[in-house]
Amino acid sequence: MRTTASGLSEGIMWDYEQNGISSELLNHFGIAPDMIPELSETFSVQGFLTAEMASLLGMKTNTPVTYRAGDQPNNALSLNVLKPGEVAATAGTSGVVYGVTESKTFDPQSRVNTFLHVNNTQDQPRLGVLLCLNSVGILNAWARQQLMAPGLSYDEMNSFAAKIPEGSDNLLVLPFGNGAERMLQNKNIGVSIHGLDLTSHNKSHVLRALQEGIAFAFNYGLEIMKPLGLNLRVIRAGKSNMFLSPVFAQTLANVSEASIELYNTDGAEGAARGAAIGAGIYNSPSEAFAGLKLLQTIEPNHHSAINQYYTKWKRVLKNVLPEK
């Protein structure tokens, strides 16, 4: 059995100041140090495929295992997000923003996590600051199931939302309905709709307000991350899930004032590149990602009025959040 420093950091078992396994945590919980597997470099030969598993997978026995990472560090690798200031995002089942920094910083309120990134070294620290929103894909799916006629696609739902001007005629949605949210200090406030006018708002307004609300929640998290050394200029994401919605993507670009780059990649392709780096097929990450294809860039519209709606959204959120 083997592990990596990045993996241990995800398990809260890494001492960032001492640059080693956290003996304080092991002692506190009574975990014997010899229970921690041998550490391997993230990109290195860490074992070989057994005959039984090779047969099951249709691969060759003794195929080397040369890379491992958690889902979000791997997603960042997939998007070639490896340098300080670079940011990866996903908007699938959950919504995640993962920004790389060289600063060993943390949020005192634990609203975001800090991990060792896959390319961290002692000489060149690379840490990933992670924001997670629980209710993204499930809320979008709920809206499609409940508000759209059977059989209509997400593209058609996005078209309904695009009929409405930004700001959704002052309709606001707090998109937190899938359990306690860490960025809200583990509070579970559910989903709520605010400013609904039964004489003027329709289904399209709700659909747009929902997507804008998710973008606002992303930006609310980004504001937590910026004091931790996140110098946000560009957000990279795979062109999938909610980033297929022009309303969501443009709203996020406008409210964050960051360019959004959408790529033709996913986590599986990134893991394959990572394994190729570990196996020595590529000499460096820059060589591995030379073929990464940029599909679309969404620039922020600096004439957008979205920030006035975001300010109202934050005011509503503050009123809804319980004090304790």
Image (tube, helix red, strand yellow):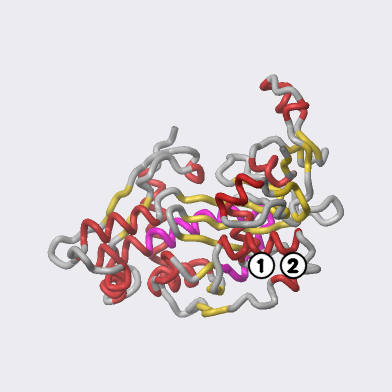
Q: Confirm whether the magenta stretch covers residue 217.
A: yes
Q: Residue at x 41, y 73 (%)?
A: 305
Q: Is residue 102 left or right of residue 195?
A: right
Q: Is residue 110 left or right of residue 125?
A: left
Q: Secondary structure at mark 1?
A: loop
Question: Crowding at label 2, few (<14), some or many (≥20) Cα neighbours within 10 Å?
Answer: some
Question: Crowding at label 1, few (<14), some or many (≥20) Cα neighbours within 10 Å?
Answer: many
Q: Residue at x 82, y 56 (%)?
A: 124
Q: Is residue 320 left or right of residue 226?
A: left
139 vs 154: above or below: above
Q: Confirm whether the magenta stretch covers residue 194.
A: no
Amino acid of disc 1 = Asn
Front residue of 23/275: it is 275
Q: Residue at x 41, y 68 (%)?
A: 248
Q: Residue furthest right?
A: 123
Front residue of 46/167: it is 46
Residue 177 pos. (x, y %): 35, 46
Which residues fall within the magenta stretch? 212-236
Rendered image: mark on residue 205? none
Q: Is residue 178 left or right of residue 277?
A: left
Q: Which residue is mark 1?
A: 80
State the separation of the CA atoms marked 1 and 2: 8 Å
Rendered image: mark on residue 285? 2
Front residue of 86/292: it is 292
107 vs 72: above or below: above
Quadrant position of the C terminus in the picture: top left
Residue 196 pos. (x, y %): 22, 58
User: For residue 153, what is the image quadrant?
Assistant: bottom left
